[in-house]
């Protein structure tokens, strides 16, 4: 059941960054954002922009493609950035500690299909699609939680 669904057009990397900053200010510990889409669609750029906007001191935010998870000390909780592309089974997610982080950290998860049944029901799903114009993206935000509908009612691009 989808409670919240909205589709946005992102016309440049800077618009993607601005949206990430808008969403970042709404996040609280326990929030999970699932980032879906093909390689090169903007998932990591979005996550990097969001994380950097939350950090008290600017630091490099590399893609966790090879480390699987990067953890940052945010002002109110840890921020977990996971890239599950290289995982083959949901039990590997548990070994990473990600399911525990869902409870008390802000979590951004790329390739969330690898979570299978471990994906939190109250997560915000962001589906990035590459538009025919190479710099443009279509982003669909969906959730089955009233929590996100209220928080994201005022976002704009």
Image: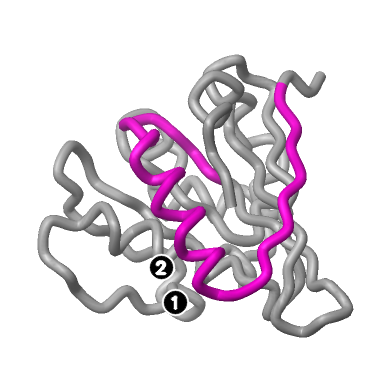
**x, y percentage for residue 99?**
46, 39
Q: Which residue is mark 1?
A: 63
Q: Give the camera-side residue of 48 and 68.
A: 48
Please give the name of the residue rendered at 71% of the width and 35% of the height, measured from the top-left corner.
Answer: 142
**x, y percentage for residue 100?**
38, 36
Q: Element under label 2?
A: helix
Q: Which residue is mark 2?
A: 48
Q: Which class describes the residues within 10 Å of circle 2: few (<14), some (14-19), or many (20+)?
A: some
Quadrant into which the N terminus falls:
top right
Q: Are marks 1 and 2 in contact (CB under 8 Å)?
A: yes
Magenta range is: 4-33
Residue 6 shown in magenta: yes
Please give the name of the residue rendered at 53% of the width and 51% of the height, measured from the top-left corner.
Answer: 93
Quadrant of the rendered structure where residue 117 is?
A: top right
61 versus 46 height, above or below: below
Q: Give the camera-side residue of 76 and 10.
A: 10
Please give the name of the residue rendered at 44% of the width and 52% of the height, measured from the top-left corner.
Answer: 95
58 versus 135 height, above or below: above
- Please indicate whether residue 79 sits to the left or right of residue 150 in the image: left
- Please indicate whether residue 103 sits to the left or right of residue 83 in the image: left
């Amino acid at each position: 059941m989808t409670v919240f669904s909205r589709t946005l057009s992102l016309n440049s990397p800077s618009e993607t960054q601005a949206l990430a900053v808008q969403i970042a200010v709404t996040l609280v510990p326990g929030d999970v954002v699932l980032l879906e889409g093909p390689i090169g669609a903007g998932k990591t750029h979005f996550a990097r922009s969001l994380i950097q906007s939350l950090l008290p001191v600017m630091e490099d935010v590399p893609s966790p493609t090879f480390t699987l998870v990067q953890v940052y000390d945010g002002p109110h909780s840890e921020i977990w950035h996971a890239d599950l592309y290289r995982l083959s089974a949901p039990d590997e997610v548990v070994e990473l500690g990600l399911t525990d982080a869902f409870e008390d950290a802000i979590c951004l998860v790329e390739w969330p299909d690898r979570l299978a049944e471990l994906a939190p029901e109250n997560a915000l799903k962001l589906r990035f699609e590459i538009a025919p114009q190479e710099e443009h993206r279509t982003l669909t935000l969906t959730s089955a939680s009233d929590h996100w509908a209220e928080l994201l009612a005022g976002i704009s691009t």
